[in-house]
Amino acid sequence: MESSSSWFIAIVSFCIIFLIRAIFSTRTTTKTTVTLPPGPPHIPILTTLSWLRKSFSSQLEPFLKTLHTKYGPIITLRIGSRPAIFIADHSIAHHALIQNSSVFSDRPKALPTGKINTSNQHNISSASYGPTWRTLRRNLASEMLHPSKIKSFSEIRNWVLETLINRLKS
């Protein structure tokens, strides 16, 4: 009985230390390394749990509108461990995504578990912007989506479409 009690105390102590360390490490690294746009305060575990409770289809847009009225046209939300930046103004979005597209076109580095799912970020949907991504895009455009290749892949596209429809029906 006493050994289970000591294990419980050790686990609870470890969790409390981890929580305190996570709170202080996010506060110090955010202020010293990167200046992000304003946003609501972030408490590592509690904020993530509150995101899990929200229905993204119906509650996200009104939530973002209230945040934009409070913090301005550019806001930062931490979803999980990563910051997400939302832009509400058309001219700022055009400036960021069209005029400075190469600056904002890269993807974040994958977590170690994500590297398994994305083939170490060597596929078209997860590769970092650069020579690898350009090669994959060129290959996709010339070999898969080129008008001369459309007929040769029609059976595969029909099979994938039927599979998708069957999964949606079930």
Image (spheres, rainbow, N blue to C red):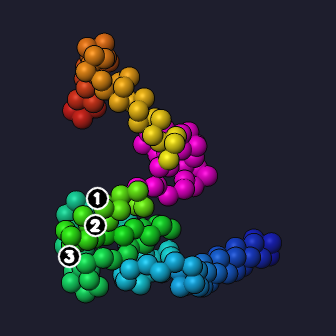
Residue toward you, 20 or 37: 37
Distance from Cα at disc 1 to Cα at disc 3: 24 Å
From the image, tell me which residue sits under label 3: 65
Picture quarter containing residue 153? top left
The secondary structure making up most of the magenta span is: loop
Which residue is at a point 35% across and 62% down the rendered structure image?
100
Residue toward you, 155 or 128: 128
Q: Judge whether residue 160 can be spotted in this image.
A: no
Distance from Cα at disc 3 to Cα at disc 2: 21 Å
Label 1–label 3 contact, CB within 8 A: no
Label 1–label 2 contact, CB within 8 A: yes
From the image, tell me which residue sits under label 2: 95
Q: Give the range drawn in magenta.
A: 105-129
Residue toward you, 117 or 51: 117
| Secondary structure type for disc 2 | helix
Please count the marks in the image. 3
What's under tag 2, amino acid-wise? His
What's under tag 1, amino acid-wise? Ile
**The magenta stretch spans residue 141:** no
From the image, tell me which residue sits under label 1: 98
Q: Is residue 56 above or below residue 91?
A: above
| Secondary structure type for disc 3 | helix
Where residue 7 appears, as percent x and y from the top left, is 75, 72
Where residue 103 appears, as percent x and y from the top left, is 42, 61
Q: Is residue 13 above or below residue 48?
A: below
Picture quarter containing residue 63? bottom left
